[in-house]
Amino acid sequence: MNISCEAGVTRRQLVAAGGTAALASFLATSPVAQAITARPSHLRRSTYLLLTDRRFRGRPADVLSSASRKLFTLVEIADLPRAKTLAKYRDSEHAFHLLFEGPPRGTQDTYVLDHPATGTFRLFLAPVGRPSAVQRYEAIVDRCAVTEAPRSEATRVETRR
């Protein structure tokens, strides 16, 4: 069988394009690929807004004993302060502030939190306010932030001219 290709496409280019198309098809339909690219539910505002029971059990991530789990109660879900000046942060699904009440004398740390509706996940919590019988803990979720790639020194010099 003799295939003529007048468009100037080589066999190597054709095989590469076919492989790319097959990979794209796999990534578009594969549950594994979708799970890898999905945003975790604990990083979405709607996950917390839909909770009827706002009590979580938690422990610092470096503590393995389940006996050390403490109660954390979600008391506030709010916009980040920058929402006042940047519209993309207002009521954003991907940028918000969580305020919990939890055990006294806690430290800032990554906590393993567990809830019947959300499952088990890790979240960085920091104590805020004055210590009292019930300590408040804050979590900030900001997946709207886009950082610029650092420019090379050559690019910086060139833009100054």
Image (spheres, helix red, strand yellow):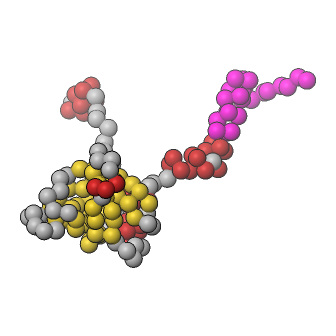
Q: Is residue 57 visible?
A: yes
**Location of the N terminus (image quadrant):** top right
Q: Farthest residue in the bottom direction?
A: 52
Q: Residue at x 13, y 68 (%)?
A: 133
Query: Toward which corner of the image does residue 117 lie, by quadrant?
Result: bottom left
Q: Residue at x 66, y 44 (%)?
A: 25
Question: Of residues 53 and 129, which is closer to you in this image?
Answer: 53
- Farthest front residue in view: 67
The quarter of the rendered structure image containing the C terminus is top left
Q: Residue furthest right?
A: 1
Please say whether residue 99 is visible from this viewpoint: no
Is residue 20 a member of the stretch shown in magenta? Answer: yes
**Of residues 42 and 33, which is closer to you in this image?**
42
Q: Which residues are magenta?
A: 1-23
In percent of width and height, residue 64 lies at 33, 47
What's the residue at 42%, 73% (across, down)? 50
Seen at 44% across and 60% down, the residue is 119
Q: Is residue 15 above or below residue 137?
A: above
Q: Tell me where residue 154 appears, x and y as whole percent.
A: 27, 25
Q: Name the side, left or right, on which 32 lies relative to 92.
A: right
On screen, residue 17 above or below 27: above
Q: How many marks?
A: 0
Q: Is residue 140 magenta?
A: no
47 or 153, nearer to the observer: 47
Q: Measured from the top left, where is residue 7 in percent x and y? A: 74, 29
